[in-house]
Image (spheres, rainbow, N blue to C red):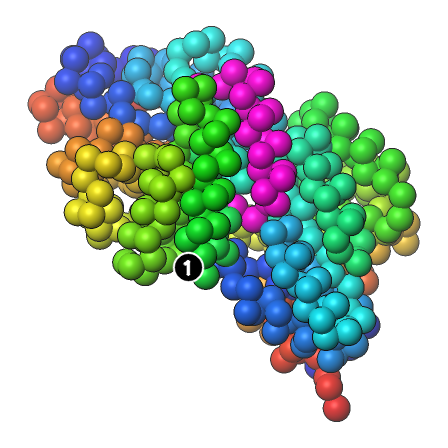
Amino acid sequence: MINSYVTDPRVQAFASGFHFGVLGEEKVLADVITEAQRLRRSGLNIEAFDCEVTMLDAARDTLGGYAKLHVPIGYPAGNATLKQKMFQLEYLLGEGIDDSCYCLDYANLVDGNWDAVTAETARVMDLCTNRLPMAMVIQATLLDDREIEAACKAILQGGANRVKMNTGYGWGTSLDEVDLVHRHFNGQIDIHPSGNVRNLAQVDHFLARGIGIVHSASVFEIVHEYAARLGLTTNTAETET
Amino acid sequence: MISPTSVIAASLSLEPDRAAVCRDVHRANARGISVLVVNENMVVCAMEEVRNAGLSVQITGLIGFPIGQWIWSAKKVAVDELAGIQNGPVAVMHGVGPWLDGAASSLEEFAGLGQITGDRWIVTSLSSIPEARLSALADDIAQTGASHLILSNGVAASGLPLPDARLIATFAKQVAGRFKLAAMMPAGTDTTTINATLDAGADKVVCADFWTLTDHT
Protein backbone atom coordinates (compact mmCIF):
# COMPACT_ATOMS: atom_id res chain seq x y z
CA MET A 1 0.00 0.00 0.00
CA ILE A 2 1.27 3.46 -0.87
CA ASN A 3 1.29 5.96 1.95
CA SER A 4 -0.49 9.15 0.94
CA TYR A 5 2.54 11.23 1.82
CA VAL A 6 4.48 9.97 -1.19
CA THR A 7 2.62 12.53 -3.29
CA ASP A 8 4.30 15.31 -1.34
CA PRO A 9 7.32 16.57 -3.32
CA ARG A 10 9.22 17.25 -0.09
CA VAL A 11 8.98 13.58 0.83
CA GLN A 12 10.09 12.43 -2.60
CA ALA A 13 12.99 14.88 -2.59
CA PHE A 14 14.03 13.57 0.82
CA ALA A 15 13.73 9.92 -0.28
CA SER A 16 15.69 10.55 -3.46
CA GLY A 17 18.98 10.59 -1.57
CA PHE A 18 18.75 7.04 -0.21
CA HIS A 19 20.21 3.74 -1.21
CA PHE A 20 18.30 0.71 0.06
CA GLY A 21 18.90 -2.93 -0.63
CA VAL A 22 19.51 -6.51 0.32
CA LEU A 23 23.06 -7.71 0.75
CA GLY A 24 24.66 -10.58 2.62
CA GLU A 25 25.82 -14.15 2.48
CA GLU A 26 22.53 -15.72 3.53
CA LYS A 27 20.30 -13.63 1.29
CA VAL A 28 18.22 -15.59 -1.21
CA LEU A 29 16.28 -14.52 -4.27
CA ALA A 30 13.07 -14.32 -2.28
CA ASP A 31 14.63 -11.72 0.02
CA VAL A 32 15.66 -9.55 -2.90
CA ILE A 33 12.36 -9.89 -4.71
CA THR A 34 10.37 -9.16 -1.54
CA GLU A 35 12.31 -6.00 -0.77
CA ALA A 36 12.36 -4.82 -4.37
CA GLN A 37 8.59 -5.29 -4.54
CA ARG A 38 8.27 -3.48 -1.23
CA LEU A 39 10.21 -0.58 -2.70
CA ARG A 40 8.00 -0.41 -5.78
CA ARG A 41 4.85 -0.60 -3.68
CA SER A 42 6.09 2.19 -1.45
CA GLY A 43 6.00 4.69 -4.28
CA LEU A 44 9.23 6.23 -3.01
CA ASN A 45 11.72 7.33 -5.65
CA ILE A 46 14.92 6.42 -3.88
CA GLU A 47 18.29 6.79 -5.57
CA ALA A 48 19.27 3.13 -5.88
CA PHE A 49 18.63 -0.45 -4.86
CA ASP A 50 21.72 -2.36 -3.66
CA CYS A 51 22.12 -6.09 -4.20
CA GLU A 52 24.70 -8.83 -4.67
CA VAL A 53 25.79 -9.57 -8.21
CA THR A 54 24.24 -13.03 -7.99
CA MET A 55 20.86 -11.34 -7.45
CA LEU A 56 21.23 -8.71 -10.16
CA ASP A 57 18.87 -10.29 -12.68
CA ALA A 58 16.14 -10.76 -10.06
CA ALA A 59 16.49 -7.17 -8.88
CA ARG A 60 16.49 -5.88 -12.44
CA ASP A 61 13.41 -7.92 -13.38
CA THR A 62 11.50 -6.95 -10.26
CA LEU A 63 12.33 -3.26 -10.33
CA GLY A 64 11.96 -2.85 -14.07
CA GLY A 65 13.86 0.43 -14.06
CA TYR A 66 12.09 1.76 -10.96
CA ALA A 67 15.42 2.51 -9.24
CA LYS A 68 19.06 2.49 -10.19
CA LEU A 69 20.93 -0.74 -9.45
CA HIS A 70 24.02 -0.69 -7.26
CA VAL A 71 26.32 -3.70 -6.88
CA PRO A 72 29.40 -3.50 -4.62
CA ILE A 73 32.91 -4.68 -5.46
CA GLY A 74 35.11 -6.50 -2.95
CA TYR A 75 32.32 -6.21 -0.43
CA PRO A 76 32.43 -5.93 2.50
CA ALA A 77 36.02 -6.58 3.56
CA GLY A 78 38.02 -5.35 0.57
CA ASN A 79 40.15 -8.45 0.95
CA ALA A 80 39.83 -9.91 -2.54
CA THR A 81 42.95 -9.73 -4.66
CA LEU A 82 43.26 -6.61 -6.77
CA LYS A 83 43.08 -8.76 -9.87
CA GLN A 84 39.78 -10.25 -8.74
CA LYS A 85 38.34 -6.87 -7.83
CA MET A 86 39.26 -5.47 -11.24
CA PHE A 87 37.53 -8.46 -12.83
CA GLN A 88 34.45 -7.71 -10.75
CA LEU A 89 34.52 -4.12 -11.95
CA GLU A 90 34.85 -5.08 -15.59
CA TYR A 91 32.02 -7.57 -15.18
CA LEU A 92 29.73 -4.91 -13.72
CA LEU A 93 30.62 -2.51 -16.51
CA GLY A 94 29.60 -5.22 -18.95
CA GLU A 95 26.34 -5.69 -17.09
CA GLY A 96 25.55 -2.02 -17.49
CA ILE A 97 24.75 -1.39 -13.84
CA ASP A 98 24.03 2.16 -12.74
CA ASP A 99 26.18 2.61 -9.65
CA SER A 100 28.78 0.84 -7.54
CA CYS A 101 31.15 1.11 -4.65
CA TYR A 102 34.63 -0.34 -4.39
CA CYS A 103 36.06 -1.66 -1.12
CA LEU A 104 39.71 -0.66 -1.10
CA ASP A 105 42.35 -2.97 0.35
CA TYR A 106 41.87 -2.02 4.00
CA ALA A 107 45.33 -3.35 4.85
CA ASN A 108 46.79 -0.47 2.86
CA LEU A 109 44.60 1.97 4.75
CA VAL A 110 45.47 0.53 8.15
CA ASP A 111 49.17 0.41 7.26
CA GLY A 112 49.15 4.00 5.99
CA ASN A 113 50.29 2.89 2.56
CA TRP A 114 48.74 5.90 0.86
CA ASP A 115 50.58 5.47 -2.44
CA ALA A 116 48.97 2.04 -2.75
CA VAL A 117 45.55 3.54 -1.97
CA THR A 118 46.08 6.16 -4.68
CA ALA A 119 47.28 3.52 -7.13
CA GLU A 120 44.31 1.23 -6.46
CA THR A 121 41.90 4.16 -6.81
CA ALA A 122 43.54 5.22 -10.06
CA ARG A 123 43.19 1.69 -11.48
CA VAL A 124 39.50 1.77 -10.70
CA MET A 125 38.90 5.27 -12.01
CA ASP A 126 40.76 4.53 -15.24
CA LEU A 127 37.97 2.10 -16.01
CA CYS A 128 35.08 3.97 -14.41
CA THR A 129 35.44 7.58 -15.38
CA ASN A 130 32.47 8.65 -17.48
CA ARG A 131 31.16 5.08 -17.43
CA LEU A 132 30.08 4.18 -13.91
CA PRO A 133 29.59 6.30 -10.77
CA MET A 134 31.93 4.78 -8.20
CA ALA A 135 32.38 5.41 -4.47
CA MET A 136 35.56 4.25 -2.77
CA VAL A 137 34.91 2.49 0.56
CA ILE A 138 37.41 3.33 3.30
CA GLN A 139 35.86 1.46 6.27
CA ALA A 140 36.39 4.54 8.40
CA THR A 141 35.68 2.66 11.63
CA LEU A 142 39.06 0.94 11.26
CA LEU A 143 40.89 4.26 10.99
CA ASP A 144 41.74 7.16 13.26
CA ASP A 145 41.10 10.77 12.28
CA ARG A 146 44.46 11.35 10.62
CA GLU A 147 44.15 8.11 8.68
CA ILE A 148 40.66 9.05 7.46
CA GLU A 149 41.99 12.38 6.25
CA ALA A 150 44.99 10.76 4.57
CA ALA A 151 42.77 8.14 2.95
CA CYS A 152 40.55 10.82 1.46
CA LYS A 153 43.58 12.69 0.12
CA ALA A 154 44.91 9.51 -1.44
CA ILE A 155 41.55 8.85 -3.06
CA LEU A 156 41.41 12.36 -4.47
CA GLN A 157 44.90 11.91 -5.86
CA GLY A 158 43.74 8.70 -7.50
CA GLY A 159 41.04 10.59 -9.34
CA ALA A 160 37.94 9.68 -7.34
CA ASN A 161 35.77 12.06 -5.38
CA ARG A 162 33.09 9.85 -3.82
CA VAL A 163 33.84 8.21 -0.48
CA LYS A 164 31.59 5.63 1.15
CA MET A 165 32.45 5.68 4.82
CA ASN A 166 31.67 2.08 5.83
CA THR A 167 29.92 -1.04 4.64
CA GLY A 168 27.61 -1.89 7.49
CA TYR A 169 27.95 -5.40 8.94
CA GLY A 170 28.97 -3.91 12.25
CA TRP A 171 31.03 -1.15 10.64
CA GLY A 172 28.75 1.82 11.10
CA THR A 173 29.33 5.42 10.16
CA SER A 174 29.57 7.85 13.06
CA LEU A 175 28.54 11.47 12.87
CA ASP A 176 32.05 12.45 13.91
CA GLU A 177 33.60 10.61 10.96
CA VAL A 178 31.29 12.39 8.55
CA ASP A 179 32.01 15.75 10.21
CA LEU A 180 35.72 15.13 9.89
CA VAL A 181 35.60 14.48 6.15
CA HIS A 182 33.17 17.36 5.65
CA ARG A 183 35.47 19.74 7.57
CA HIS A 184 38.58 18.82 5.59
CA PHE A 185 37.12 18.14 2.15
CA ASN A 186 33.90 20.11 1.87
CA GLY A 187 33.15 20.56 -1.81
CA GLN A 188 35.85 18.14 -2.90
CA ILE A 189 34.48 14.83 -1.69
CA ASP A 190 30.97 13.51 -2.04
CA ILE A 191 30.47 11.68 1.28
CA HIS A 192 28.26 8.57 1.37
CA PRO A 193 27.41 7.57 4.94
CA SER A 194 26.67 3.86 5.20
CA GLY A 195 26.19 1.47 8.07
CA ASN A 196 24.08 1.90 11.16
CA VAL A 197 22.02 4.75 9.70
CA ARG A 198 18.75 4.09 11.47
CA ASN A 199 16.90 7.31 12.23
CA LEU A 200 15.96 10.76 11.03
CA ALA A 201 18.21 12.58 13.46
CA GLN A 202 21.26 10.97 11.84
CA VAL A 203 20.04 11.85 8.36
CA ASP A 204 19.32 15.44 9.42
CA HIS A 205 22.92 15.65 10.56
CA PHE A 206 24.16 14.43 7.19
CA LEU A 207 21.86 16.67 5.15
CA ALA A 208 23.02 19.71 7.12
CA ARG A 209 26.47 18.95 5.76
CA GLY A 210 25.30 18.82 2.18
CA ILE A 211 25.37 15.07 1.87
CA GLY A 212 23.34 13.79 -1.04
CA ILE A 213 23.55 10.00 -0.73
CA VAL A 214 22.79 7.95 2.39
CA HIS A 215 22.75 4.15 2.57
CA SER A 216 20.22 2.75 5.01
CA ALA A 217 18.27 -0.44 5.54
CA SER A 218 15.77 1.68 7.50
CA VAL A 219 14.78 3.98 4.65
CA PHE A 220 11.05 3.32 4.97
CA GLU A 221 11.07 4.05 8.69
CA ILE A 222 13.19 7.18 8.24
CA VAL A 223 11.02 8.55 5.45
CA HIS A 224 7.95 7.87 7.57
CA GLU A 225 9.54 9.74 10.44
CA TYR A 226 10.21 12.63 8.09
CA ALA A 227 6.62 12.64 6.84
CA ALA A 228 5.39 12.65 10.42
CA ARG A 229 7.52 15.68 11.16
CA LEU A 230 5.96 17.44 8.19
CA GLY A 231 2.55 16.62 9.65
CA LEU A 232 1.69 14.36 6.72
CA THR A 233 1.01 11.37 8.93
CA THR A 234 0.16 11.10 12.57
CA ASN A 235 1.10 7.52 13.17
CA THR A 236 4.83 7.58 13.90
CA ALA A 237 4.96 3.81 14.21
CA GLU A 238 3.37 3.10 10.85
CA THR A 239 5.51 2.29 7.86
CA GLU A 240 4.75 1.25 4.36
CA THR A 241 3.01 -2.11 4.30
CA MET B 1 44.33 -27.80 25.20
CA ILE B 2 43.59 -28.79 21.62
CA SER B 3 45.84 -31.04 19.60
CA PRO B 4 47.56 -29.15 16.73
CA THR B 5 46.49 -31.97 14.41
CA SER B 6 42.88 -30.94 15.01
CA VAL B 7 43.54 -27.30 14.25
CA ILE B 8 43.59 -25.23 11.08
CA ALA B 9 45.12 -21.93 12.02
CA ALA B 10 43.30 -18.78 10.94
CA SER B 11 44.52 -15.24 10.52
CA LEU B 12 41.35 -13.86 8.98
CA SER B 13 40.72 -10.66 10.84
CA LEU B 14 38.42 -8.28 9.01
CA GLU B 15 40.53 -5.52 10.51
CA PRO B 16 43.61 -6.38 8.49
CA ASP B 17 47.03 -6.34 10.07
CA ARG B 18 50.01 -7.57 8.06
CA ALA B 19 52.14 -7.75 11.20
CA ALA B 20 49.60 -10.06 12.83
CA VAL B 21 49.56 -12.27 9.74
CA CYS B 22 53.36 -12.54 9.79
CA ARG B 23 53.27 -13.36 13.49
CA ASP B 24 50.63 -16.03 12.89
CA VAL B 25 52.74 -17.60 10.13
CA HIS B 26 55.52 -18.14 12.64
CA ARG B 27 53.18 -19.25 15.40
CA ALA B 28 51.39 -21.80 13.22
CA ASN B 29 54.70 -23.15 12.04
CA ALA B 30 56.02 -23.36 15.59
CA ARG B 31 52.98 -25.35 16.70
CA GLY B 32 53.34 -27.80 13.83
CA ILE B 33 49.96 -26.81 12.41
CA SER B 34 49.87 -27.76 8.76
CA VAL B 35 47.76 -24.95 7.26
CA LEU B 36 47.22 -21.28 8.03
CA VAL B 37 44.25 -19.68 6.26
CA VAL B 38 44.46 -15.98 5.50
CA ASN B 39 42.49 -13.49 3.48
CA GLU B 40 43.19 -13.53 -0.26
CA ASN B 41 45.03 -10.23 -0.15
CA MET B 42 47.37 -11.46 2.59
CA VAL B 43 48.73 -14.48 0.73
CA VAL B 44 51.66 -12.62 -0.80
CA CYS B 45 52.66 -11.22 2.58
CA ALA B 46 52.30 -14.59 4.35
CA MET B 47 54.20 -16.48 1.65
CA GLU B 48 57.04 -13.99 1.77
CA GLU B 49 57.37 -14.76 5.45
CA VAL B 50 57.29 -18.51 4.81
CA ARG B 51 59.99 -18.28 2.15
CA ASN B 52 62.22 -15.81 3.95
CA ALA B 53 62.14 -17.76 7.17
CA GLY B 54 62.26 -21.19 5.53
CA LEU B 55 59.05 -22.37 7.20
CA SER B 56 57.01 -25.45 6.35
CA VAL B 57 53.51 -24.22 7.19
CA GLN B 58 51.13 -24.12 4.23
CA ILE B 59 49.38 -20.87 3.40
CA THR B 60 45.89 -20.83 1.96
CA GLY B 61 44.05 -17.72 0.84
CA LEU B 62 40.35 -17.95 1.56
CA ILE B 63 38.72 -16.75 -1.66
CA GLY B 64 35.41 -14.94 -1.37
CA PHE B 65 35.46 -14.63 2.40
CA PRO B 66 33.35 -13.58 4.25
CA ILE B 67 30.24 -13.57 2.04
CA GLY B 68 30.98 -15.72 -1.00
CA GLN B 69 28.30 -14.03 -3.07
CA TRP B 70 30.42 -13.15 -6.11
CA ILE B 71 30.16 -15.28 -9.23
CA TRP B 72 32.52 -18.14 -9.97
CA SER B 73 34.27 -16.43 -12.89
CA ALA B 74 35.47 -13.72 -10.50
CA LYS B 75 36.56 -16.20 -7.83
CA LYS B 76 38.32 -18.24 -10.50
CA VAL B 77 40.53 -15.24 -11.23
CA ALA B 78 41.75 -15.46 -7.63
CA VAL B 79 42.01 -19.26 -7.76
CA ASP B 80 44.32 -19.03 -10.76
CA GLU B 81 46.30 -16.13 -9.32
CA LEU B 82 46.83 -17.71 -5.90
CA ALA B 83 47.75 -21.06 -7.45
CA GLY B 84 50.99 -19.44 -8.51
CA ILE B 85 51.67 -17.91 -5.12
CA GLN B 86 50.43 -20.00 -2.21
CA ASN B 87 51.60 -23.43 -1.09
CA GLY B 88 48.35 -24.59 0.53
CA PRO B 89 45.10 -25.99 -0.83
CA VAL B 90 42.56 -23.93 -2.76
CA ALA B 91 39.80 -22.64 -0.48
CA VAL B 92 36.67 -20.94 -1.79
CA MET B 93 33.75 -19.52 0.12
CA HIS B 94 30.44 -20.52 -1.40
CA GLY B 95 27.54 -18.14 -0.88
CA VAL B 96 24.88 -19.94 1.06
CA GLY B 97 22.08 -17.82 -0.43
CA PRO B 98 22.65 -18.96 -4.03
CA TRP B 99 23.03 -22.55 -2.83
CA LEU B 100 19.69 -22.39 -1.03
CA ASP B 101 18.16 -21.02 -4.24
CA GLY B 102 19.75 -23.74 -6.36
CA ALA B 103 20.89 -20.80 -8.48
CA ALA B 104 22.85 -21.21 -11.69
CA SER B 105 25.73 -19.33 -10.05
CA SER B 106 25.93 -21.96 -7.32
CA LEU B 107 25.83 -24.86 -9.76
CA GLU B 108 28.48 -23.23 -11.92
CA GLU B 109 30.76 -22.73 -8.95
CA PHE B 110 30.48 -26.34 -7.80
CA ALA B 111 31.16 -27.50 -11.36
CA GLY B 112 34.19 -25.23 -11.51
CA LEU B 113 35.49 -26.48 -8.18
CA GLY B 114 35.08 -30.01 -9.45
CA GLN B 115 37.44 -29.27 -12.32
CA ILE B 116 40.26 -28.04 -10.13
CA THR B 117 43.06 -30.50 -9.80
CA GLY B 118 44.65 -30.86 -6.41
CA ASP B 119 43.36 -30.35 -2.93
CA ARG B 120 40.41 -27.97 -2.59
CA TRP B 121 38.37 -26.78 0.34
CA ILE B 122 34.93 -25.20 0.39
CA VAL B 123 33.66 -22.78 3.00
CA THR B 124 30.02 -21.99 3.70
CA SER B 125 27.66 -21.05 6.49
CA LEU B 126 25.75 -24.04 7.79
CA SER B 127 23.43 -22.34 10.23
CA SER B 128 21.15 -20.84 7.63
CA ILE B 129 20.58 -24.19 5.95
CA PRO B 130 17.45 -26.09 7.07
CA GLU B 131 18.19 -29.54 8.49
CA ALA B 132 16.06 -31.11 5.78
CA ARG B 133 18.62 -29.94 3.21
CA LEU B 134 21.79 -31.02 4.98
CA SER B 135 21.87 -34.27 3.05
CA ALA B 136 21.74 -32.39 -0.26
CA LEU B 137 24.53 -30.09 0.87
CA ALA B 138 26.72 -33.05 1.82
CA ASP B 139 26.08 -34.64 -1.58
CA ASP B 140 26.89 -31.43 -3.45
CA ILE B 141 30.14 -30.90 -1.58
CA ALA B 142 31.18 -34.52 -2.02
CA GLN B 143 30.52 -34.29 -5.73
CA THR B 144 33.04 -31.47 -6.11
CA GLY B 145 35.77 -33.69 -4.72
CA ALA B 146 36.55 -31.19 -1.98
CA SER B 147 38.56 -32.67 0.86
CA HIS B 148 37.30 -30.23 3.51
CA LEU B 149 34.18 -28.20 4.19
CA ILE B 150 34.76 -25.32 6.56
CA LEU B 151 31.65 -24.23 8.41
CA SER B 152 31.80 -20.47 8.71
CA ASN B 153 29.86 -17.79 10.43
CA GLY B 154 31.14 -15.42 7.74
CA VAL B 155 30.49 -11.91 8.89
CA ALA B 156 29.46 -12.51 12.48
CA ALA B 157 27.70 -9.16 12.57
CA SER B 158 25.19 -10.47 10.06
CA GLY B 159 23.77 -12.45 12.92
CA LEU B 160 24.44 -15.90 11.57
CA PRO B 161 25.35 -18.17 14.45
CA LEU B 162 27.98 -20.85 14.26
CA PRO B 163 26.55 -24.34 14.02
CA ASP B 164 26.17 -25.91 17.41
CA ALA B 165 27.33 -29.41 18.35
CA ARG B 166 23.93 -30.94 17.67
CA LEU B 167 23.80 -29.54 14.13
CA ILE B 168 27.36 -30.62 13.44
CA ALA B 169 26.56 -34.14 14.67
CA THR B 170 23.52 -34.28 12.40
CA PHE B 171 25.50 -33.02 9.44
CA ALA B 172 28.46 -35.32 10.11
CA LYS B 173 26.13 -38.30 9.71
CA GLN B 174 25.13 -37.03 6.27
CA VAL B 175 28.75 -36.43 5.31
CA ALA B 176 29.63 -40.00 6.30
CA GLY B 177 33.35 -39.44 5.94
CA ARG B 178 33.21 -38.33 2.30
CA PHE B 179 35.09 -35.15 3.22
CA LYS B 180 36.42 -33.62 6.40
CA LEU B 181 34.40 -31.13 8.41
CA ALA B 182 36.11 -28.13 9.95
CA ALA B 183 34.26 -25.64 12.11
CA MET B 184 35.31 -22.02 12.53
CA MET B 185 35.81 -21.06 16.15
CA PRO B 186 35.86 -17.28 16.60
CA ALA B 187 38.46 -15.69 18.82
CA GLY B 188 37.57 -16.21 22.45
CA THR B 189 35.85 -19.57 21.98
CA ASP B 190 36.56 -21.69 25.05
CA THR B 191 38.11 -25.16 24.92
CA THR B 192 34.93 -26.78 26.25
CA THR B 193 33.00 -25.53 23.21
CA ILE B 194 35.80 -26.52 20.86
CA ASN B 195 36.03 -30.02 22.30
CA ALA B 196 32.25 -30.38 22.11
CA THR B 197 32.46 -29.44 18.43
CA LEU B 198 35.17 -32.03 17.81
CA ASP B 199 33.30 -34.67 19.80
CA ALA B 200 30.17 -33.95 17.77
CA GLY B 201 31.89 -34.97 14.55
CA ALA B 202 33.97 -32.05 13.32
CA ASP B 203 37.33 -33.36 12.15
CA LYS B 204 39.04 -30.02 12.70
CA VAL B 205 38.45 -26.57 14.08
CA VAL B 206 39.56 -23.34 12.43
CA CYS B 207 40.97 -21.17 15.20
CA ALA B 208 42.21 -17.61 15.38
CA ASP B 209 43.33 -18.33 18.94
CA PHE B 210 45.38 -21.35 17.91
CA TRP B 211 48.47 -20.10 19.73
CA THR B 212 46.86 -20.18 23.14
CA LEU B 213 44.65 -23.18 22.48
CA THR B 214 47.32 -25.61 21.35
CA ASP B 215 49.87 -27.29 23.54
CA HIS B 216 53.48 -26.44 22.90
CA THR B 217 55.09 -28.40 25.70
Q: Is residue A82 magenta?
A: yes
Residue A198 in the image: x percent, y percent? Answer: 29, 40
Q: Who is closer to the viewer here, B164 or A117? A: A117
The residue at which mark 1 appears reads as: A112
Residue B17 in the image: x percent, y percent? Answer: 52, 64
Q: Quadrant of the C terminus of chain A?
A: top left
Residue, far left: A231
Residue B126 in the image: x percent, y percent? Answer: 68, 47
User: Can see residue A44?
Assistant: yes
Which residue sits at x=27%, y=20%? A16
Q: Is residue A115 above or below residue B46?
A: above
Q: Is residue A60 above or below residue A141?
A: above
Image: magenta residue range: A77-98
Give the residue type that dot 1 points to: Gly
For disc 1, the chain is: A
**Horizontal arrangement in the rendering, residue B185 relative to residue B118 (left or right):** left
What secondary structure prevails in the magenta region? helix
